[in-house]
């Protein structure tokens, strides 16, 4: 990140004031540092006028990122955070309302055929080679098996530019540039349960009657149901990410019965609902997302993201470009993506318990202790604090589930949309209404 | 003479035009649109024009629809009864027991204070209060009335109705209070002079004369409850569904035609209910 690699002669020689030129130079330097070719940025001045509108789920739509973009790249990034349903809806129906869609891979499967997004040229992505193989080949190690469900590798590429068809193998045209992902499991209140929890089946254990919860987002909730039913030994699924009608019926039937028996305290739809349910002790075991665990912990309430024998349900998000993007805005979007993968964001997200698509670059932005705790699964050597400055773990503690390989290597299935999605949704509505 | 009449007609039309246009663009047109879309088809991510009855067919053939409508009627009915009793009592107190106008106005304003904050906030503030370790449960336990926390206080139909009653009672109080204030006090004196007891005055004089107010309040409460979705979702912890939630779920899943069909059925239901209510009382007399 040195400014000296910037050829001075390439500075725009317009009649701009000295200060404007300097500001332009600073922005150019930042850009050049993250640009593959290091080509002269003629538009260095214009780029400050660019505003990119990004929307997505709350997880990565963070104001800190927008601020840093302004500092490092000079342009404005407007962020809108919505829930997954609204995100899908917007990406599918209002292509002109955004420039960058921060969506999950299963949403991509749903939205891509509308033609509202454009594929990205991987040759313009500086860190493409360093992106975790989970997103390219789907295999963390060469001998791993691609997990069930909408694994990112299955919808990560299209056959050619402008195509609506997903490619089976990595190609030059990428649908989403992976940003963050994680392996999800059940969250528990160890202080209120008081015994080890090892299986997904515990979610329906009558011991937790009236104290369990799952999330009311059908496409994700059905997966947690499937993990539970499989763990109970009730159902063997061909592919949990793409169930048959019969499998859906059976799964919903088991949960409907549990609901009627009063197993569930509530269902949650938004992140903060899940935090409140857990923190208030209304619920002691529920499907949960990693930062929600963090949020409960920062209130000083014990909460564990419990690794389970059957493995994790995983999800991943990425940035997609609106079809409407072109010219300067498109260039700015590529700059943004390259910057996104260059480490600062990764470090920021990893300190909250997520993973970055390019873990290597994040390392430089994390202390050795943080890297060891979050990525390598080593005991912390000092206090682990969140980016907001709250203490999450003391020296000696290790991360729930262990290292990156340990956690991401045990993904049983990915969030997905099924072929029988409409049928599943109707069944889900019945489940909620029952 | 003729020209004068003509210009009068023209003025009449012109005066009516703004409201007509507003209603046309913001009421009739959107509803017509919803009606049209309710016959369209939908794929997972898009909707396409068509003329098919699939949406209605699915709606009427699914047992969930009937369950959900039954639940919606239940919420509307119980909420209506509770708000009516409370609303009538409050209005009666304000109109007949508080003597000075200043106090009437002051107390009436007091009733509206909760409405200075948002609907959602008033609703959500019940959650920590009713929760398992909430104020209600811990107080009851400290008083020794219960040993175990009451689970049904929160995330239950009870919680939903409590929130509805809390949110909508004022809509009952205002019109009832309004009609009560118009009742000629000499009628009550006359009744008393004729030897009517307090209860007889209530049933034979006050209630019949307050009917229009009761009806207006009822229409407010019933339509608000029938169309709600967020109160039910939050207070039942997503565990119960009413028609509004059915629609909102469909919208969330991009199933606009099916949402439109449900909305049309709901609209028809509510209109029928209001028509029935209006058969009982001619509220136009009061307006």
Image (cartoon, coloured by chain):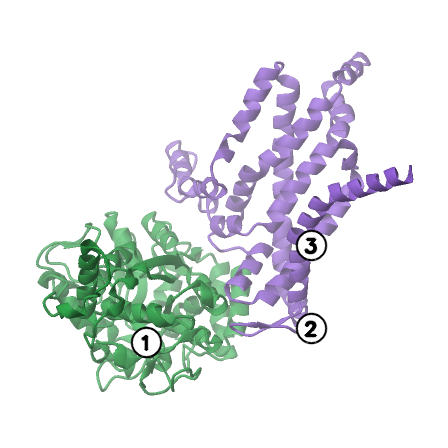
Q: Nearer the viewer, mark 2 or mark 3?
A: 3
Residue A233: image quadrant is bottom left
Distance from the alpha carbon under mark 2 to that under mark 3 = 20 Å
Q: Nearer the viewer, residue B35 or A275?
A: B35
Q: Which residue is mark 1?
A: A412
> Which mark identifies residue A361?
none
B122 horizontally vs B36: left or right:
left
Quick one: quadrant of the N terminus of chain A? bottom left
Q: Which residue is mark 2?
A: B51
**Tint of chain B:** purple
Q: Nearer the viewer, mark 1 or mark 2?
A: 2
Residue A230: image quadrant is bottom left
**Mark with earlier residue (2, 3):** 3
Circle 1 chain:
A
Q: Secondary structure at mark 2?
A: loop
Q: Which chain is green?
A: A
Q: What is the residue that sits farthest to the right in this orientation?
A: B1
Q: Nearer the viewer, residue A338 or A225?
A: A338
Q: Secondary structure at mark 1?
A: strand
Do dots 1 and 2 share one subunit?
no
The reply to whether residue A317 is in sight is: no
């Amino acid at each position: 990140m040195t400014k000296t690699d910037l050829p001075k002669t390439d500075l725009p020689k317009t009649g701009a004031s000295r200060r404007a030129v300097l500001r332009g130079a600073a922005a150019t330097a930042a850009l050049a540092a993250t640009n593959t070719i290091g080509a002269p940025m003629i538009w260095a001045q214009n780029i400050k006028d660019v505003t990119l509108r990004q929307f997505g789920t709350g997880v990565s739509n963070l104001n800190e990122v927008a601020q840093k973009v302004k500092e490092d790249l000079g342009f404005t990034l407007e962020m809108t955070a919505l829930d997954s349903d609204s995100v899908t809806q917007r990406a599918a129906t209002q292509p002109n309302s955004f420039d960058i869609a921060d969506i999950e891979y299963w949403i991509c499967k749903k939205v891509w055929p509308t033609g509202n997004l454009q594929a990205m040229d991987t040759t313009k992505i500086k860190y493409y080679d360093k992106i975790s193989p989970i997103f390219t080949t789907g295999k963390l190690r060469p001998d791993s098996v691609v997990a069930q469900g909408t694994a990112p590798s299955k919808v990560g590429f299209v056959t050619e530019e402008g195509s609506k068809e997903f490619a089976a193998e990595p190609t030059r045209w990428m649908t989403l540039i992976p940003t963050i992902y994680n392996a999800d499991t059940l969250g528990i209140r160890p202080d209120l349960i008081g015994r080890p929890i090892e299986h997904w089946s515990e979610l329906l254990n009558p011991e937790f009657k009236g104290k369990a919860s799952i999330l009311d987002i059908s496409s994700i909730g059905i997966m947690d149901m499937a993990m539970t039913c499989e763990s109970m030994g009730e159902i063997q699924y061909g592919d949990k990410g793409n169930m048959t009608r019969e499998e859906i019926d059976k799964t919903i039937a088991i949960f409907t019965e549990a609901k009627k028996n009063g197993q569930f305290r509530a269902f949650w739809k938004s992140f903060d609902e899940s935090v409140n349910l857990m923190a208030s002790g209304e619920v002691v075991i529920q499907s949960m997302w990693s930062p929600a665990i963090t949020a409960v912990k920062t209130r000083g309430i014990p909460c564990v993201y419990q690794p389970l024998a059957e493995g994790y349900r995983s999800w991943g998000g990425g940035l997609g470009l609106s079809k409407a993007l072109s010219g300067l805005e498109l260039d700015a979007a590529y700059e943004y993506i390259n910057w996104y993968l260059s480490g600062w964001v990764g470090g920021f997200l990893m300190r909250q318990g997520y993973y970055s698509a390019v873990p290597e670059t994040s390392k430089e932005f994390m202390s050795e202790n943080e890297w060891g705790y979050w990525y390598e699964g080593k005991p912390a050597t000092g206090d682990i604090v969140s980016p907001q400055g709250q203490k999450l773990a003391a020296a000696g503690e290790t991360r729930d589930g262990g290292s990156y390989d340990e956690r991401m290597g045990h993904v049983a299935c990915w969030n997905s949309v099924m072929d029988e999605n409409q049928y599943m949704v109707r069944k889900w509505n019945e489940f909620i209404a029952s | 003479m003729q020209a004068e009449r003509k210009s009068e007609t023209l003025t009449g039309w012109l005066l009516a035009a703004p409201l007509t246009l507003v209603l046309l663009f913001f009421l009739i047109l959107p509803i017509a649109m919803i009606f049209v879309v309710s016959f369209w088809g939908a794929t997972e991510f898009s909707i396409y024009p068509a003329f098919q009855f699939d949406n209605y067919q699915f709606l009427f053939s699914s047992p969930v629809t009937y369950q959900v409508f039954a639940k919606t009627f239940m919420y509307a009915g119980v909420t209506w009864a509770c708000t009516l009793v409370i609303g009538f009592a409050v209005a009666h107190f304000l109109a007949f027991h508080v003597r000075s106008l200043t106090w009437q106005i002051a107390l009436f304003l007091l009733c509206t204070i909760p409405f200075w904050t948002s609907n959602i906030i008033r609703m959500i503030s019940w959650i920590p209060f009713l929760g398992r370790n909430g104020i209600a449960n811990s107080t009851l336990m400290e008083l020794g009335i219960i040993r175990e926390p009451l689970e049904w206080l929160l995330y239950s139909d009870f919680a939903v109705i409590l929130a509805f009653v809390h949110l909508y009672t004022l809509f009952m109080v205002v019109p009832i209070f309004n009609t009560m204030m118009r009742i000629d006090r000499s009628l009550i004196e006359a009744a008393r002079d004729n030897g009517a007891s307090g209860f007889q005055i209530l049933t034979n004089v006050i209630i019949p004369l307050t009917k229009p107010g009761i009806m207006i309040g009822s229409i407010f409460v019933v339509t608000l409850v029938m169309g709600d979705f967020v109160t039910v979702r939050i207070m039942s912890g997503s565990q119960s569904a009413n028609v509004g939630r059915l629609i909102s779920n469909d919208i969330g899943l991009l199933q606009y035609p099916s949402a439109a069909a449900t909305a049309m059925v709901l609209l028809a239901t509510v209109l029928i209910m209001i028509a029935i209510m209006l058969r009982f009382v001619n509220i136009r007399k009061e307006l």
